[in-house]
Image (cartoon, grey):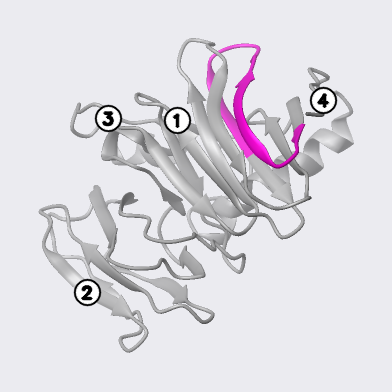
Amino acid sequence: MKIRTSTQRSTHPLSRKIIVIGLLALVSVSGLARATEADLLVPVSFQGTPIPEARQNFLASQRYAILSREGEPIAFHVRNASPNKVADIILQDSAGGAVADQTVEPGEYDIRFEVPGPGVYFMEYTGENPHWTLTLPEGVSAVLCLEPGEPMNHSGNFGRRYFYVPKGTTEIRFTVESGHLEYSMEVLDPDGTVMQVIDQNQPAKPIPVEAGTDGQVWSFNSKAFAPTFLSFENIPNYLAVSPDALLLPKDLVEKDGL
């Protein structure tokens, strides 16, 4: 097993600026806020319920935001299932500074990255034709960052995943596309009522948000394969395994009084 670990931090002002814009472009694309350092992600609590273990399989590179509540290491399990292909795992802080990285050959790994302090860190898994599994332990606040135009390529059923609909939202607009796999996915309101079923024969349509259901957590429930592409057009592009695992832009949390 070849391992590279780095704690070197980016200090060059220009490099820092470029990385910040790249990391926060997701928020800008979603139409929520400007791409500035003010758009930091912070934890929220909706139900006060335990956060379960999160396990997802991917056939594409992905980015996760993961919270270190008290400065504890960012720890998770990874399985690289791509035959004869290595992958890189990169950890950055919320300003885009390099924290650590590790290269993994095919196999199973318990990853543990030391961090300089509490906060949200961005973990990115990249590789050539990646096929991998991520398992986050119980109690960890973390979100999958959906990036418009980039494949999600979840392998198999991703189950129930939660997202936040900001106050004042009157409809949810999102993009769902699939390459060749048949998929089926429900969209549920905060009460668990199925508002729309999306599959190969029923494309996604804007979903009206009734008064009182904005400013709350909605969810997807995958009934079969997940779609290849999935992203929101007008709400935060973050999915979590439970409502209390969500991380949201700080300015939005303050605006909505969360």
Res 189 quadrant in image? bottom left
Q: Closer to us: mark 1 or mark 2?
A: 2
Q: Answer whether residue 106 is magenta in the image.
A: yes
Cα–Cα gap, marks 2 and 3: 26 Å
Say left or right for 79 vs 175. Answer: right
Q: Amino acid at mark 2?
A: Gln
Cα–Cα gap, marks 1 and 4: 29 Å
Q: Which mark is residue 196?
A: 2
Quadrant of the drawing holding the C terminus:
top left
Mark 3 nearby-residue class (10 Å; few <14, some 14–19, many ≥20) = few
Q: Amino acid at mark 3?
A: Ser
Instruction: Find numbered disc 4 in the image and state the secondary structure of the residue it sits on.
Output: loop
Q: Tell which of 89 and 191 is nearer to you.
A: 89
Q: Which mark is residue 42?
A: 1
Mark 1 nearby-residue class (10 Å; few <14, some 14–19, many ≥20) = some
User: x, y percentage for residue 167?
Assistant: 27, 51
Q: Which residue is mark 4?
A: 4
Q: Closer to us: mark 3 or mark 4?
A: 4
Cα–Cα gap, marks 1 and 3: 10 Å
Q: Amino acid at mark 4?
A: Arg
Which residues are drawn in magenta? 103-123
Q: How would you classify the magenta stretch by its main secondary structure?
A: strand
1 and 4 marks in contact (CB < 8 Å):
no
Q: Which mark is residue 230?
A: none
Instruction: Find numbered disc 1 in the image and state the secondary structure of the residue it sits on.
Output: strand
Instruction: Find numbered disc 2 in the image and state the secondary structure of the residue it sits on.
Output: strand
4 and 2 marks in contact (CB < 8 Å):
no
Cα–Cα gap, marks 1 and 2: 29 Å
Name above or below for residue 153 compared with residue 238: below
Q: Amino acid at mark 1?
A: Val
Res 107 quadrant in image? top right
Name above or below for residue 38 compared with residue 211: above
